[in-house]
Structures are given as structure tokens and as C-alpha cells.
Amino acid sequence: MGPSIWTYLDKQWVRIEPLVWQQIELIALCMVLSALIGISVGVLVWDRPKLAGAAQSTASVILTIPSLALLVLFIPPFGLGWLPTVIALILYAQLPIIRNTITGLRGVDAGMLESATGIGMTRTRRLFRVQLPLAWPVILAGLRVSTMMTFGISAIASYINGPGLGNLVFTGLSRLGSANSENQVLVGGFGIAILALVFDGLFLVLRRVTVSGGLRV
């Protein structure tokens, strides 16, 4: 029987800590880029039914591709490591963000838009001053879902030498039966889950800070 998980953490923390920070940096980077891309796409197509349908269908198709298969396909053009991992995670994160952006913008009351137009607001000003603030709770929910999905898929990226705690999971699985193999799997898996809960909590804080009480449901 191998050492306890606490003993393993104590002795191997100097090697585990960089993986923790890599995991945090990976998800933060991917979600910032995913939000910029997904919200922009949603803003461009929300009032164009055919384009909105095409954008959501494309994102849906990408989400059906097995993550390991997509990561392997990215090896020839992008190599191993951070780049293919980031690109893959951004692609997988798009559907909830695009869908919620479209849904949120379409859900803004038409009377409010007419009032904004009536007082002289341009289309762009109306979008940024009225529509996006009112749609933000729905958009934020999409970002939250995408973040949780991204955490789950990120573990598989270690197969192509991607960063993060997934490396512990894959290393442990490849060495099952040897000393510390189970501890590696547990630390990697539970570490990802704990960080996902931390990020989820940050979204709750962000929602409280950025969404007015009248818009919270």
C-alpha cells in the first residue's frame, strides 16, 4: 500500500503547485478569449435568424467532436502543448456563450428598445447602453456553463502535453499499480474539481457585483 494522499501532497507539492497555476492560467486565458469571441459572434448575428442559426449549429457540431480526437487532429498544424490546447478549449466553449448571448439580446423588451430609439440613441449606443446590460445575466450564465465544461475537457489535453493538473491524472492512470499512481489520479482529478468550484464561486461574486438586484432571478 502506497503512502497516504496527504503524505504524497506534502512531499510532492513542489511539483504539483506549478500544475495548479498552469490549470488556473489555462482556464482564465481560454475563458477571456472565448468570451470575447462568443459574445462578439452573438452580438453580430442575434437579429439575423439565418446567421444566428448557422453560428449555433456550427458551435453545436464542434461540441459533438470527441475532445481527444480534436486534440490529436490539432497536432500536425499546431504541435503539442499550450497552443492546440487553448484553441480546442476555445472552440468547445463557444456554444453556451453564443447561444446565451443571442437569447439574452432577443429577450430584451421591445418597448425599451423603442424608447431608446425615441430619445435619439443610435443602434450601437442602444446595444451597449440598453441591450447588453439587460442581457448580461443570461450571458453570464452561458460563461459559467462554458467554464465548467472547459475544466472537464482540459484534463484530456495532457494527452498532447497540455498544461495543468490533467498531467497527474494521465500519469497516474499510465502507472496504475505502482507507488503513488492512485494518489496522482486523485490529486489531479479532485484538484480540477476544486478549482472548478472556485471559479464557479467567482462567477457568483461577479454576478452579484455586475447585475442589479432587479435583474437577478
Image: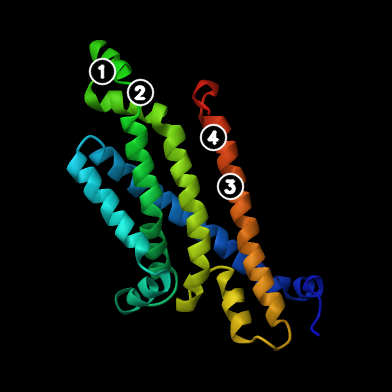
Query: Where, by quadrant of the figure, is residue 52 drawn?
Result: top left
Asked if the residues shown at circle 4 and circle 2 are in contact, with their CB atoms under 8 angstroms apart, the answer is no
Q: Residue at x 49, y 25 (%)?
A: 215
Question: Of the residues tagged 1 and 3, which is closer to the observer?
Answer: 3
Residue 4: image location, x then y, percent: 81, 75
Residue that mark 1 sits on = 121
Badge 1 marks a residue whose secondary structure is: loop
Q: What residue sits 63% from the left and 69% below the top?
A: 188
Q: CA distance from mark 3 to mark 2?
A: 27 Å
**Quadrant occupied by the N terminus:** bottom right
Nearest-to-viewer mark from 1 and 4:
4
Q: Earlier in the sequence, mark 4 or mark 2?
A: 2
Q: Position of residue 60 (x, y in %)?
A: 32, 56
Tell me, yes or no, whether the two marked residues, 1 and 3, touch with CB atoms within 8 Å: no
Which tag, 1 or 4, sits closer to the chain's start? 1
Give yes or no for contact between labels 2 and 1 (Cβ–Cβ under 8 Å).
Answer: yes
